[in-house]
Image (cartoon, grey):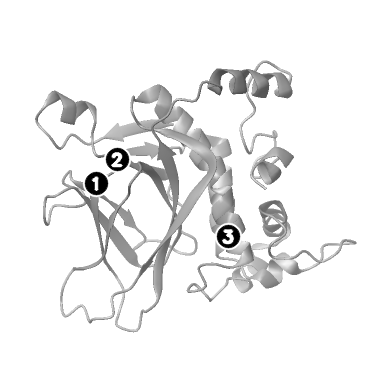
């Protein structure tokens, strides 16, 4: 993993403690595997999840993310295409709530990385997730490139990751009090699905400092026929504490793994397959 911070202020404090950071996990195979499977699962119809496997019983959509992922892994690309869930507006279902819950695996690794890479980013107490759904504006665009849709302020620092982003849209997050300066020029960031075919799967998580004013606007290639949910984000809620038991917890994890190395969620030596710990750690 690596992190990039954007310097938006002029004082030393502002430069050392930026309002947001980007964490790229493209080089972390375990985290990439988990996030990819969770996004695929969110877009998959429960009919595929509940279908019985060879010689096995049918699975309930709420049984757990491990069963969801195993069903996807055993399906062909054609079967997955046919099983695409058209109901993007059903944000909370047993299946999707299980998926949001499992994003704690990603947030755990990202938060631990940030604790080593930067100070004052906060600590995750899993499970600690919330969900932010962003909908298309009801009013017509009328030639506007972007339309403001949500304004948000979190009471804690958060980790922000999209679990669903509809094809063709671009969401811009402006951070702080500067107006009209979000996106590429330094006071915000963009999630861009204008070139996406299928499931949006970029390898970025954003950390946003608590108390920051966040304004979300929507643009991209979409017409007036688009309505309802445009994107769903999972937020890892952080706190400022440094648990005294953290070192002991690390030693316990190392001891359980039995090889002197902490085993992270998703590490099992087989690409694209979650291990038992990743399936059950937050049940």
Q: What number is the disc on residue 162?
A: none
**Structural distance between the alpha carbons of marks 2 and 1:** 6 Å
**Structural distance between the alpha carbons of marks 2 and 3:** 25 Å
* Image coords of residue 101 (percent x, y): 57, 51
| Quadrant (top left, top right, bottom left, bottom right) of the N terminus | top left
| Residue 178 to residue 223: above or below | above
* Image coords of residue 211 (percent x, y): 26, 45
| Residue 253 to residue 174: above or below | above
- Residue beneath label 2, please? 209
- Other residues around mark 1 within 10 Å, as few (<14) / some (14–19) / many (≥20): some
Q: What number is the disc on residue 212?
A: 1
Q: Secondary structure at mark 1?
A: loop
* Image coords of residue 205 (percent x, y): 40, 44
- Residue beneath label 3, please? 97
| Residue at the far bottom in the pictured view | 225
**Structural distance between the alpha carbons of marks 3 and 1:** 27 Å
Tell me the residue at 62%/23% (across/down): 262
Q: Toward the viewer: 217 or 48?
A: 217
Q: Secondary structure at mark 2?
A: loop
Tell me the residue at 55%/36% (across/down): 29
Tell me the residue at 53%/76% (across/down): 87
Q: Is residue 190 visible?
A: yes
Splitting the image into 4 quarters, where does residue 12 fall?
top left
Q: Toward the viewer: 22 or 158?
A: 158
* Image coords of residue 260 (percent x, y): 67, 15
Splitting the image into 4 quarters, where does residue 158 fall?
top left
**Marker count (numbered):** 3
- Other residues around mark 2 within 10 Å, as few (<14) / some (14–19) / many (≥20): many
Q: In the drawing, does residue 177 fall left or right of residue 140?
A: left
| Residue 44 to residue 225: above or below | above
């Amino acid at each position: 993993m690596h992190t990039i911070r954007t310097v938006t202020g002029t004082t030393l404090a502002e430069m050392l403690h930026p309002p947001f950071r980007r964490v790229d996990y493209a080089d972390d195979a375990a985290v990439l595997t988990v996030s990819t499977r969770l996004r695929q699962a969110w877009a998959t119809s429960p009919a595929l999840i509940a279908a019985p496997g060879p010689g096995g019983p049918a699975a309930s959509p709420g049984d757990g993310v491990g069963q969801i992922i195993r069903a996807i892994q055993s399906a062909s690309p054609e079967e997955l295409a046919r099983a695409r869930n058209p109901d993007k507006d059903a944000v909370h279902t047993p299946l999707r709530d299980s998926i949001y819950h499992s994003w704690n695996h990603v947030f755990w690794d990202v938060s631990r990385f940030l604790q080593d890479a930067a100070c004052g980013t906060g600590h995750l107490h899993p499970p600690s997730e919330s969900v932010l759904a962003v909908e298309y504006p009801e009013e017509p665009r009328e030639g506007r490139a972007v339309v403001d849709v949500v304004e948000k302020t979190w009471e804690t620092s958060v980790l922000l990751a999209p679990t669903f982003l509809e094809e063709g849209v671009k969401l811009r997050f402006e951070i702080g009090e500067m107006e009209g300066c979000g996106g590429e020029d330094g006071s915000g960031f963009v999630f861009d699905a204008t070139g996406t075919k299928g499931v949006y799967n970029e390898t970025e998580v954003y950390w946003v400092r608590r108390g920051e004013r966040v304004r979300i606007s929507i643009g991209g290639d979409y017409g007036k026929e688009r309505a309802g949910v445009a994107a769903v984000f999972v937020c890892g809620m952080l706190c400022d504490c440094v648990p005294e038991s953290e070192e002991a917890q690390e030693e316990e994890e190392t001891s359980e793994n039995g090889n002197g190395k902490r085993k992270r969620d998703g590490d099992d030596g087989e690409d694209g397959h979650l291990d038992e710990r990743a399936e059950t750690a937050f049940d």
